[in-house]
Each structure stands twice: as C-alpha cells, then as structure tokens.
Image (spheres, rainbow, N blue to C red):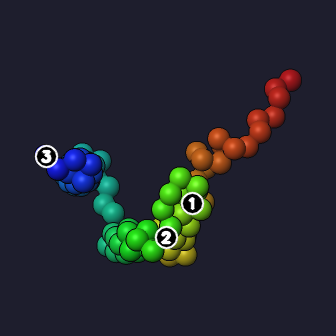
Amino acid sequence: LFGIVGAASATTLVSFILMIAILLYTERHFSVRLSAKLWIVSLASAIGIALLSRMLPSGPISFLLSGTVLFVFYYLPLFLTKELKDSDLDPIRKLFTKKKPQA
C-alpha cells in the first residue's frame, strides 16, 4: 500500500521502539546510565545528519562521498565533546591493524 516509504517508516519506528526498550533494559539490569550530555550531543548529531543528507547529492557514485561526509559529521561532535573516547574505537582499530607474527 505505501511501498518503499512505508517500509522505511515502519523500520524507523520499530528501531526507535527497540532502542528505547534496550535502553530501559540496560539501565534496569546493568545499572548503566547515559549522561544527559551524551543524549543531547547524539540527538543533535542525528538531526544534523538528517538535515545534511537532504542537501548532499544522491546517486550510486556520490553515495560514497555523501556517506563519508555524514559519518564525519555525526562522529566529530562526539569526539569534540569527549563523549566518544579513544578506547571506544579500539575494536574498530583492531580490524585494520596488522597482527605481529607470533614466534
């Protein structure tokens, strides 16, 4: 009935509901609380990339450029406000570093 727009809307809605459920579960069972600063910076970054994505060109070739710009635009505020620390990136760094051969 709604095609691709309906599928995208349903996916977004379910993802948001699951995110809230996971957040509540984590807070209740693991006593982990996210700071208000992290919420605000993350929300502002998400809104920023949503707005910026409307201005960037779309298409199969420009997708790489647009994706890179959006990635940087989302993570840069998290780095600048120290909400995303170097240790948070260690698992990603391990994917791209050479392992030393063991003797």
Q: Earlier in the sequence, mark 3 or mark 1?
A: 3
Most extreme residue toward the right, as rendered? 103
- Residue highlighted by disc 3: 1
Q: Residues within 10 Å of mark 2 (few under 14, many from 20)?
A: some
Q: Amino acid at mark 2?
A: Leu
Instruction: Determine the residue positioned at 17% across, 50% down.
Output: 2
User: Disc 2 to disc 3, how far (Cα)?
Assistant: 29 Å
User: Disc 1 to disc 2, how far (Cα)?
Assistant: 9 Å
Most extreme residue toward the top, as rendered? 103
Q: Quadrant of residue 9?
A: bottom left
Does residue 91 appear in this view? yes
Q: Nearer the viewer, residue 15 or 30?
A: 15
- Residue highlighted by disc 2: 56
Q: Position of residue 37 (x, y in %)?
A: 37, 75
Most extreme residue toward the left, as rendered? 1
Q: Is residue 39 left or right of residue 17?
A: right
Determine the secondary structure under disc 3. loop
Q: Is residue 8 left or right of residue 84?
A: left
Q: Are marks 1 and 2 in contact (CB under 8 Å)?
A: yes
- Residue highlighted by disc 1: 62
